Image (cartoon, rainbow, N blue to C red):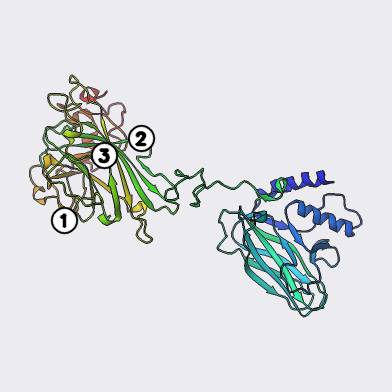
Amino acid sequence: MKKIVSILALIACAIQINAQSVTLECETSSSPISSGGSRDAADRRNYDIANCWGFGGVTYTNISPLSGSFSTQSGSATNLNPTSFWIKSPWFKPGSGNITLKTKLSSSSGSSRYLRLAYIPYDANASYKEGTRVDFYTHTFTINTSVVNISEAIPSAIANSGQPYKIIALMFGSGGSSRIMTDSWNIPGTYWADPSNSCYPLALIADADSDGVADDDDAYPNDATKAYNNFFPAAGYGTLMFEDLWPATGDYDFNDLVLDYRYNLITNADNKVVEMDGSVVTRAIGASFRNGFAFQMNGIAPNKIVSTTGPKYHGASWLNNAANGTENGQTYANIIVFDDAQKVLPSPGGSGTNVIPANGRVAPDTTNLVITFVTTSGQELQLSDFDLNPYIIVNQIRGKEVHLPNGVPSTLNNPEWFGTFQDDSKPNEGKYYKTKNNLPWALSIDSSIPYTHTTSDLIDAYLRFADWAQSNGTLYTDWYVNNPGYRDTNKLFIP
């Protein structure tokens, strides 16, 4: 008999794990139905026990059942102690909605009767893994035999929590001999008990740092302050290319400073940004100017940053940083990544670094940044708050910045450069760092691409670039891709 019950229990368990509710109907038996007497009642009760329902002083009866042939029945509820008679559900992961059941009194004998619902949390260190009971609903019976349909919402504290709980119904009262009967239980959620392991919960989702994010989904399973990575570009590095003769177009080769970049905005379990890890790879310098590289976090105040590590400084006289690594005197947070590209990637001799194929090659240099943000409640940053605005500082002149097209300059930029030479910036219109034909002085591509030789014009190397720029970005949005007719590779520095 035990073997049959166990097999049936495991079958029921497999069915209920995929169900949207945990139910108790008091009808299923693990052996053939006989005369419907006490043996059948006990067998039905044993079947439900095998499927991890628990009963304290509660039996099954076929006398005036609420539905079907059998219902549960408490002992004579004359004890005011609410723990004398109870029904306890299996472990389950709560969903949302209402717990429903039918109940009535077996007779009108008695002065008071109550049915109280509570939930029991999982506690790995407690007896039977059951934590402290939390009561959330009590029904007071009218002393008669009318059927009562109870419908009570799953408490918001546990609904959709992803953690295992039990529901317990406590039956108690005083006076007379009336018993409390129940049937047709329906509890929204997923069955999560293991009949083969003393009805303990099924294997819980591992969460080593207890931040509410499963280890399988947590990029930092042992650090409760971090949970998710948010990379840009999503796969691999992007490329930044700058022309440093702004506001003149100059030779327009876009290799005066060539960088690859990738950054990661790390969020916690609440999807608030706690850290930014960035990598800036200096690939080539096609200019004699000693340019610095920086980025502005548009819209983010400097006091949102706790600390910055990793920038490379070489004693530039214009450097003026606060203790948190942001530049002083700025409305928004500005991070100077390095102050002098020539010191970061020195030339092997002659003119430029990694822009003349005949000259010696220098290994690219990587600058790794770690920026931590405030995590005070109400002060945290969201992913949507981030708009990174990279730029170069031309030849150690702090007020001379070159940004991406329409990149808003920092507070320390000198606006006197706007509208001179070929620059057609119109700050009152939000137009920055474009010529009259919409040609830019800086480019950002979300993949790593080749750059030009020092004697080649970008327009001649990337054959669809001019079409893209002059259309204000509406045509040939893939101008940088290696499609047929898109590149003249003879003008590109390809390792």
Query: 134 left or right of 368?
Result: right
Asked whether 377 or 455 is in front, the reply is 377
Dividing the picture into quadrants, the one containing residue 83 is bottom right
Q: Which residue is mark 2?
A: 236
Q: Amino acid at mark 3?
A: Ser
Label count reads 3
| Residue 433 screen position, x and y as percent | 17, 45
Circle 3 SS class: strand
**Disc 2 from disc 3: Cα separation:** 14 Å
Q: Residues within 10 Å of mark 1 (few under 14, many from 20)?
A: few
Does the image show residue 259? yes
| Residue 31 screen position, x and y as percent | 85, 49
Q: Nearer the viewer, mark 2 or mark 1?
A: 2
Q: Which mark is residue 428?
A: 1
Circle 1 SS class: helix
- Of the 4 image quadrants, the one containing the C terminus is top left
**Disc 3 from disc 1: Cα separation:** 24 Å
Q: Is residue 133 above or below residue 486?
A: below
| Residue 421 screen position, x and y as percent | 7, 42
Q: Is residue 470 above or below residue 131?
A: above
Does the image show residue 301? no
Q: Nearer the viewer, mark 3 or mark 1?
A: 3
Query: 164 left or right of 183?
Result: left
Q: Residues within 10 Å of mark 2 (few under 14, many from 20)?
A: few
Dividing the picture into quadrants, the one containing residue 314 is top left
Q: Nearer the viewer, mark 2 or mark 3?
A: 2
**Disc 2 from disc 1: Cα separation:** 37 Å
Q: Amino acid at mark 1?
A: Asn
Asked whether 121 or 22 is in front, the reply is 121
Circle 2 SS class: loop
Q: Which residue is mark 3?
A: 444
| Residue 268 screen position, x and y as percent | 42, 51
